[in-house]
Amino acid sequence: MRALLLMILLALSIPAGAAQRWEILPPTPAPIPADRGGQANVNGISLHYAVYGRGSPVILLHGGLANLDYWGHQIAALKSRHMVIAMDSRGHGRSTRDARPYGYDLMADDVIGLMDVLNLPKADIVGWSDGAILGLDLAIRYSSRVGKVFAFAANTVPSGVNDDVEKNPTFAAFIKRARQEYEKYSATPREYDSFLEQISKMWASEPNWTDAQLKAITAPVLVVDGDHDEAIKREHTEYIAATIPGAGLLILPNASHFAFLQDPDLFSYAVLHFLGDRAR
């Protein structure tokens, strides 16, 4: 199908008085006890992961500076119909890192390494921000291992990100919260400033995909964003959907870069619908 712009409006209801919901950063969900998980030796690091439920596998990939706890609402919505695998990206949350610089190819290789540990030949991907970039990276470089890709708030070149996004109050609140969570979970709790600096270097230089690379993607892709995303330019989101063959485009109303927290029911409904489920 051709790139398609969908707007989900009042049919799914926006709470009264929540016109500025996109300006609010809701709390990080409390951790959900996993059916199994722990630490896996993957690609030279100790990677933290958690597995929930049964069914076709879906891997949840969080955004930069975050951790798998951010997916709590979606884990709860998906685990009755899918095997849900959530992981902390290298150097994030409870996962360690090595001396190699952060890069999307390296982090995508980590995902494949975890899939190998779990004996998963193929999985659908749901990604947010850096996690969405990783989903597209996997679709480009590991097409046989990827089913569908739900790519929320991705960019494919650095210029797709708004300048000075870190000065936006909501995004600044996220960066502050990320420090607290890093200090709580990380094996190197005093190194957040260095961690942020190194991740920022990656953001400034990656990814740099060409039209040809995007046009070579064969996985079904839904390109998603909030209508008030602080970080990603709307025209860039529309470009991604128009360039990937058959991709759909979904803009979530009254939501920002953190739509999965701001309107978790709608976000999860969109994920389930894209994966071929019907929300209960």
Image (cartoon, rainbow, N blue to C red):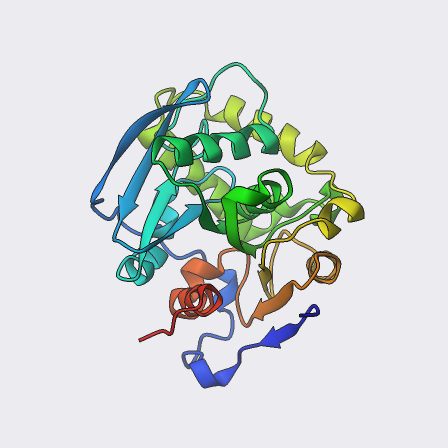
Residue 100 occupies which quadrant of the picture? top right
The quadrant in which the N terminus is found is bottom right
Residue 213, placed above or below residue 25: above
User: In which image quadrant can residue 78 be found?
Assistant: bottom left
- Quarter that holds the C terminus: bottom left
Residue for point 41% across, 79% down = 15
* Horizontal relation, residue 264 to residue 143: left or right: left
Q: Residue at x 51, y 75 (%)?
A: 19
In front: 213, or 8?
213
Residue 178 percent coordinates (x, y): 43, 38
Identify whether 219 is placed above or below 156: below
- Is residue 49 visible to us here? yes
Q: Residue at x 29, y 40 (%)?
A: 50
Residue at screen point 67% across, 50% down? 217
Q: Residue furthest bottom?
A: 11
Residue 34 vs residue 17, the one in the foreground: 34
The reply to whether residue 130 is in sight is no
Residue 275 placed where, x, y %? 45, 63
Residue 37, image quadrant:
top left
Label count reads 0
Judged left or right of residue 279, residue 1 is right
**Residue 266 in the image: x percent, y percent?**
43, 70
43 left or right, relative to 169: left
Residue at far right of view: 211
Residue 169 sits above or below residue 242 on the image: above
Does 62 sit left or right of 75 as displayed?
A: right
User: Measured along the vertical axis of the image, is residue 185 above or below residue 24?
Assistant: above
**The one of 32 and 150 positioned closer to us in this rendering:** 150
Q: Position of residue 83 (x, y in %)?
A: 31, 51
